[in-house]
């Protein structure tokens, strides 16, 4: 069964909603929740997630909100944090990873932390049994891929194209997938541009997909009530999970 990871922006529109949404997604086929940590300069994210980031920050988001949300979601669904390195660094990586462990978080996704720099924190991740998710891009060469993935944990985040989330581009990933498979048995999940229309094509040759902008776009809608947003996201999750596993929708 191929996996579905859902990204949602933490505390948008509020913490209770984030928990309710995460649990509803888990009930509708999502295998892991990626809690997005709001940041003022989300360089890897497109305008949809960027807008949700700003709204969450305007609503007073603090890292303690992330901890409180995670403590509730992790009891029911595998929970990871996706965030930029600056707030993590200023909080203190040792302290942050200890807190993450205490609330049941199993992995961090830090898109702007280069692999070479991440090696400085490898022992801290290992001490807390938390995965530092490895990134691979279509532009990476074979030697680079070997270096990045040979000790990868939980899953490898394969970026579907060079650019930002939600851009909807398409690139052939066959060669990069083959290169990854040559050096590791760690599952490969593809992210960027995955939605109800593209999921079936994007999952070819990999073990799962990561969906972010498609869910967050629903959350940004001003025409839906909170319950309608949760219902729509649940429906989307069911559809995508069925598509990536060639099940009847």
Image (tube, rainbow, N blue to C red):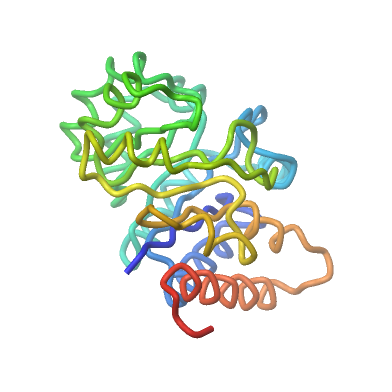
Q: Residue furthest bottom?
A: 248
Q: Quadrant of the N terminus?
A: bottom left
- Tell me where residue 89 appears, x and y as whole percent: 43, 21
Task: Give the residue drawn at x 18%, y 23%.
Answer: 123
Q: Residue at x 47, y 71 (%)?
A: 241
The quadrant in which residue 228 appears is bottom right
Q: Is residue 21 visible?
A: yes
Rendered position, 96 above or below 204 = above
- Where does the image place residue 218, in percent across and percent down from the top left? 70, 63
Residue 194: x and y in percent read 58, 55
* The furthest residue to the left: 127
Which is nearer the eye, 111 or 121?
Answer: 111
Horizontal side of residue 130 vs 207, given as left or right: left
What residue appears at the point 40 percent right and 57 percent down from the top-left corner? Answer: 208
Q: Position of residue 182 (x, y in %)?
A: 24, 36
**The one of 236 and 244 positioned closer to us in this rendering:** 244
Q: Nearer the viewer, residue 245 or 3?
A: 245
Left or right: residue 34 compared with residue 123:
right
């Amino acid at each position: 069964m191929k996996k579905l990871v859902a990204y949602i922006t933490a505390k948008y529109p509020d913490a209770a909603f984030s928990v309710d949404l995460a649990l509803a997604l888990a009930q509708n086929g999502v295998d892991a929740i990626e809690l997005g940590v709001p940041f003022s300069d989300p360089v890897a994210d497109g305008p949809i997630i960027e807008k949700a980031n700003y709204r969450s920050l305007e609503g007073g988001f603090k890292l303690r909100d992330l901890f409180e949300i995670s403590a509730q979601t992790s009891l029911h669904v595998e929970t990871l944090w996706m965030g930029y390195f600056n707030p993590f660094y200023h909080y203190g990586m040792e302290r942050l990873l200890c807190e993450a462990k205490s609330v049941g978080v199993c992995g961090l996704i830090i898109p702007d932390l280069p692999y070479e720099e991440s090696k400085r924190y490898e022992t801290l991740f290992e001490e807390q049994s938390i995965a530092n998710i490895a990134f691979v891009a279509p532009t990476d060469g074979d030697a680079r891929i070997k270096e990045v993935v040979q000790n990868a944990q939980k899953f490898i985040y394969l970026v579907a194209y060079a650019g930002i989330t939600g851009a909807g581009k398409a690139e052939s990933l066959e060669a990069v997938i083959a290169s990854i498979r040559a050096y590791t048995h760690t599952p490969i999940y593809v992210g960027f541009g995955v939605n109800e229309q593209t999921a079936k094509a994007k999952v070819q040759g990999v073990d799962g997909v990561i969906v972010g902008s498609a869910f967050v776009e629903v959350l940004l809608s001003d025409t839906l009530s909170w319950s309608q947003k949760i219902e729509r996201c649940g429906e989307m999750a069911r559809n995508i999970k069925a598509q990536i596993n060639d099940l009847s929708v």
